[in-house]
Amino acid sequence: MKTAISDLEPQKLWENFESICNIPHPSKHEEKIIEFVKSIGESSGLETTVDKVGNVIIRKPATTGYEALKVTTLQSHLDMVPQKNSGIDHDFTKDPIKPYIDGEWITAENTTLGADNGIGVATILSILQSNEIEHGPLEALFTIDEETGMTGAFNLEPGILNGEILLNLDSEDEGELYIGCAGGVSTHAAFHFETADLHDGYNCYQLHLCGFKGGHSGVDIHLERGNSNIEMARILFELINKFDAEVISFNGGDLRNAIPREAKSLIAIPESHEKEFINEIMLLEQRLKNELAVNAKGINLKFKQIDCEKPAIAKLIIKTVLRAIISCPNGVLRRNIEIPEVVELSSNLGIINTFDDKIEIHTLQRGSIDTLRELAAEQVRHVFELAGAQVSHSGEYPGWSPNPHSPILEKMKNIYLNMYGEEAKVRVIHAGLECGIIHAGHQKMDMISFGPTIRFPHSPDEKVHIASVRKFWDYTLEVLKNIPNQ
Ligand SMILES: [Zn+2]
């Protein structure tokens, strides 16, 4: 007979997780799950408040003998990323998620599972409901909208939390303790241009540069997978210099926070240079493959002659735009001096779009030290401003600067070693976590982020490792018993 999820241990946690799967809770539609969490707090006789944006805070007194421990905040986010397989009929605002056991894992039928961060929410609820678990004074914080703007964390009233320690349960590798994250800021540049009609004797081509591996612009930025936008800019600049090419349009990438995988451009080349042009395209493709080495598999610079009536971007302007793109700080800009595998500062030139009279460029800078992130944003700004663009910044959020000497980190490392006979790995993530934002409003809080093992979050392949949930649960309870005294 097949095992049911409700037969798994710890039973209460899985029961809560199944309930969460039954309640639609995509980002921006958290009303029902807020109600669910609130009703558990109230029916357990605990102080329960919902703030003006929908974050839920529930406070639970210490169990007998643990009254002297520091107040600990347990935190998870209520929303999930709604992704489904193509061709599937699923309304995330109405239909339940259908989880099932697949070997050692739990996954969902054709949709994201929402283990990110449903397991965290289920864990905290199980602790709040229990009469047996031993712990000091607790404060549970359930935030809304982590996945599409962190507006819950942003709108949390500064100083509203009493916790001296915050345990964020939103990490995805059991056995890893996160002690820092990066903040971010977007920098946009706009170049306005004049156009000029193409001269006679020019043929138009569409260039398509594709096959880059892409990835998350934070956590994958150190993998040197190449940036299709910058590579296309280099190619266009060469073609202008060698063949007096005209550029009609240049588009690439579609998200600021993804490393761009492809770029397209419409160009025109004097007919007399056609042969050398075709030869040059092959050489440029080869140059790129040579530079990308192991990441070159699949890289392709395609070209195709087409009819085009559009005018070209004025030569002087497009050359300046391309120079700025090529010179824009991009990729890893600095690593941590003490932990060299940790990227501390980066930039990603994510999107280039050509409109009738302007080219827009969107970049994203990330940094775990806020002032360094500001410096990177300034550098990008200066490059584009020197080239004559209008530049603006938006969407700034703070980082959480790692403290390798954090007392709760020391404690949690020891507990892990005692329980499992191996060292927990200490990590800093080069991406945003709510910890950064919460920390900005509660600077004295000592924080750690950890969680069970989740694979392929934010995709319909999302799955959570069953045994890791058990380990994570046992570990969390042990940590709660061993929180230092006030
Ligand atoms: Zn999450």
Image (cartoon, grey):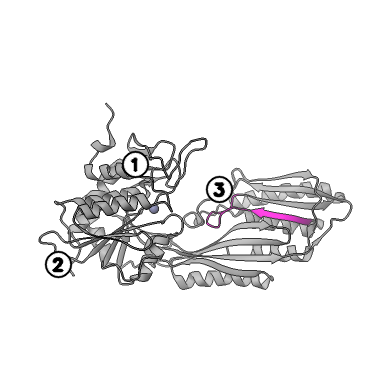
- Can you say whether 366 is above or below 219 in the image? below
> Does the CB distance between marks 2 and 3 fall below 8 Å?
no
Three-letter amino acid code of the residue under disc 1: Asn
- Relative horizontal placement of residue 429, taking residue 209 as reference (left or right): left
- Viewer can see residue 131: yes
Q: Residue drawn at (31%, 52%), measured in percent from left and top?
A: 35
Three-letter amino acid code of the residue under disc 3: Lys
Mark 3, Cα crowd under 10 Å, few <14 / some 14-19 / many 20+, is: many
Q: Is mark 2 within 8 Å of ligand 1?
A: no
- Viewer can see residue 417: no
Residue corresponding to mark 3: 213
Total labels drawn: 3
Residue corresponding to mark 1: 22
Q: How many angstroms separate mark 2 from mark 3 (CA)?
A: 52 Å
Dot placed on the residue nearer the N-terminal end, 2 or 1 = 1
Pick the front one: 131 or 431: 131
Which quadrant holds residue 1?
top left
Q: Is residue 123 magenta?
A: no
Element carrying mark 1 = helix
Element carrying mark 3 = loop
Residue corresponding to mark 2: 68
Q: Pinpoint residue 260: horizontal percent, then vertical percent.
A: 58, 53
